[in-house]
Image (cartoon, rainbow, N blue to C red):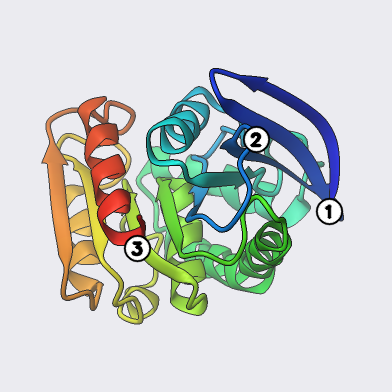
């Protein structure tokens, strides 16, 4: 891991880094040392590691809970070069979604790509970050909606370090079989009028989690209209399970 820049404001230290060719950002309390919970943030499609919503969540986790937070760019996003297979699947997915055509073959291909490449990348990032003295080997939480959920479910299923997760805004793009391997506490966000993810698909995914503690948060509005107060709930959720 190589840090490329460092800034701080309002008690939050922000460090940009490269792990091989994976660009990421780590937020921690300024001047802190020792082990603390770590939250991995998965950005949405078309966004990046420093999208406004990601940064807002990260700074609140650090400032209000004393957590460490890490985010990375998904393939073909942010500072990463175009990934031919990822871009092809995403482009065809959008075209088929708009035309109302079958998505199953593309979804299967994307799930395979996530398991083959993106999950190992995230595991390598967790390994590297937890070796730092100001993070340490503490409990890990995962937050990700939309694309962040699609990537997060197979990661959580494969990664025993993740103790709790906030997910949502996804449905058929996620394997129900994979979701059934998740037993950690889950808070799941659904937008009742989501124009991208049919409500029935979101509810099917929620039902698939094997977690004995799982909570459905359903709000009116479209895909990108998650209410701001859900961030407060997310902080309380992770503080309860990781803090």
Q: Seen in the image, is 105 located left or right of residue 78?
A: left
How far from the left and from the top, in percent, is residue 154?
48, 70
Q: Nearer the viewer, residue 127 or 116?
A: 127
Residue denoted by label 2: 31
Does the CB distance between marks 1 and 3 fall below 8 Å? no
How far from the left and from the top, in percent, is residue 60?
41, 31
Q: CA distance from mark 1 to mark 3?
A: 26 Å
Residue drawn at x 38%, y 33% is: 64
Q: Nearer the viewer, residue 15 or 199?
A: 15
Quadrant the C terminus occupies: bottom left
The first of marks 2 and 1 along the sequence is 1
For label 2, the crowd category at 10 Å Cα-Cα, with few meaning under 14, some 14 to 19 and many 20 or more, is few
Q: CA distance from mark 2 to mark 1?
A: 20 Å
Callout 3 secondary element: strand
63 to 159, vertically: above or below: above
Callout 1 secondary element: loop
Q: CA distance from mark 2 to mark 3?
A: 27 Å
Residue 68 visible to an observer of this rendering:
yes
140 to 115, vertically: above or below: above
Residue denoted by label 1: 1
Residue denoted by label 3: 164
Q: Nearer the viewer, residue 104 or 213?
A: 213
For label 1, the crowd category at 10 Å Cα-Cα, with few meaning under 14, some 14 to 19 and many 20 or more, is some
Q: Seen in the image, is 103 located left or right of residue 127?
A: left
> Toward which corner of the image does residue 191 lie, by quadrant?
top left
The first of marks 2 and 3 along the sequence is 2
The first of marks 1 and 3 along the sequence is 1
Q: Nearer the viewer, residue 142 or 113?
A: 142
């Amino acid at each position: 891991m190589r840090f490329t820049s460092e800034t701080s404001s309002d008690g939050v230290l922000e460090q940009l880094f490269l792990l091989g060719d994976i660009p990421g950002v780590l937020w921690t309390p300024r001047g802190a040392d020792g082990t603390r919970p770590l939250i991995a943030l998965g950005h949405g499609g078309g966004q990046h590691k420093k999208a406004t919503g990601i940064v807002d969540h990260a700074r609140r986790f650090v400032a209000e809970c004393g957590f460490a937070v890490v985010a990375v760019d998904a393939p073909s996003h942010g500072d990463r070069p175009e990934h031919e297979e990822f871009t092809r699947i995403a482009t065809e997915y959008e075209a088929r979604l708009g035309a109302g055509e079958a998505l199953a073959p593309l979804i299967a291909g994307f799930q395979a790509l996530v398991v083959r490449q993106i999950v190992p990348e995230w595991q390598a990032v967790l390994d590297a970050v937890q070796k730092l003295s100001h993070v340490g080997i503490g409990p890990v939480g995962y937050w990700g909606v939309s694309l962040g959920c699609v990537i997060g479910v197979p990661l959580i299923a494969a990664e025993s370090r993740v103790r709790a997760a906030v997910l949502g805004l996804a449905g058929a793009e996620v394997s129900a079989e994979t979701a059934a391997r998740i037993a950690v506490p889950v808070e799941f966000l659904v937008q009742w009028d989501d124009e991208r993810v049919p409500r029935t698909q979101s509810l099917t995914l929620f039902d698939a989690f094997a977690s004995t503690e799982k909570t459905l948060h359903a709000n009116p509005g479209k895909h990108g209209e998650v209410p701001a107060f859900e961030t407060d709930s997310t902080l309380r959720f992770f503080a309860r399970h990781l803090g």
